Image (cartoon, rainbow, N blue to C red):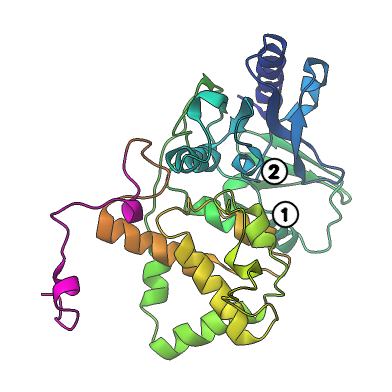
Amino acid sequence: MSGAGLSARIAEAASRLLSEGSAEVVIGFEQGSIPMRATPCLVTDPSDAGRLVWNAFCANNLAKYLEPGRKAAIVAKGCDSRAIVELVKERRLKRSDIVVIGVPCTGMADPRAIARRFPGLRVTAVEESDGMLVIHGGPGPVSVPLDEVLHAGCRLCAKRNPVVCDIPMGDPVAEIDPGFPDVEAFASLPADERRVRVEAEMAKCIRCYACRSACPLCTCASCFADSSQPQWVGRGAHPEDVMAFHVMRAMHLAGRCVECGACARACPTGVDLSILNRRLASDVSELFGCRAGLDENAPQPLAASSMEDPQDFILDPGRKQE
């Protein structure tokens, strides 16, 4: 189904849900003020449902906009739905308060990748057709397959269809979970090269917290980074403070990060946070046999325990694991 066809179906569903009182708000996307941008849109009046759109630039994770106690319908692709699963499991939200309008996703286009593909092109409009983007802005339109200009996170998506869904939109797409080739490639580098790469990424950070603001799982009422008593981490841009903030945040998200890439997309300086988050997701997958957001019935790996868990490290901390 085309983006225009999906947009019309989403608008129709949104209008109906608001009119019958099934939702107080519908969270979706509307066309941004510049080409290649779709911005989050919260619709409360059925007459505004026509503002909702669906296209290859609906990249934000909309689960960020769900509020406890507010009945909401949300347009959710695979990564949005994984975040919803985790938020419900953490009891941040009630599943009964959420109507999921599920949209199968083949990945979102990265405007920066398009700019690299067509340097100097001032894009005025983009059309989509059968997996191709037709881009206007030069003497004549140019085209590029969508899968050649995807966000990096979309190339590594573990679940492209919504994990939970109440109102399906379109036919399911094929799943192509590639695993963790990026993590394996990074781990194969010599230790010095890995350290240099991590330090280079952290050096880009300006501590604007856009990563935290965009993350659907950053839901703490008070963040450790803002605490002054005690002060867990300095607030400046000293390399040690920057490293401490990102490592602590990554550890806090271990087993909870749904790998949507919202943090990396929001970063104004292009810090590749997947270098930390994807490594921890890989470790959790290997050690606990699960990935965040894929199973709404599975216990959270770092919030569950059993008598069969290894406990030698408690009785004899110095003992090496066999």
User: Is 318 in front, or is 256?
Assistant: 318
Give the amino acid type for the residue marked by disc 1 in the picture. Answer: Pro
Q: Which residue is mark 1?
A: 111
Q: Residue furthest top?
A: 20
- The residue at 40%/87% (across/down) is 191
- The residue at 40%/59% (across/down) is 281
**Where in the figure is residue 98, as x and y percent of width and height?**
56, 27
Mark 1: secondary structure: helix
Specify start and end residues of the magenta stretch as a single range.
298-322
Name the disc covering residue 57, or none.
2
CA–CA distance in space, label 2 to label 1: 8 Å
Residues at discs 2 and 1 in contact (Cβ within 8 Å): yes
Residue 265 visible here: no
- The residue at 67%/75% (across/down) is 205
Quadrant assignment, res 47: top right
Q: Is residue 173 left or right of residue 239?
A: left
User: Magenta span has 69?
Assistant: no
Q: Is residue 50 left or right of residue 154?
A: right
Relative to 245, say whether 52 is above or below: above
- Identify the mark nearer the N-term, 2 or 1: 2
- Disc 1 crowd, CA 10 A, few/some/many (<14, 14-19, 20+): some
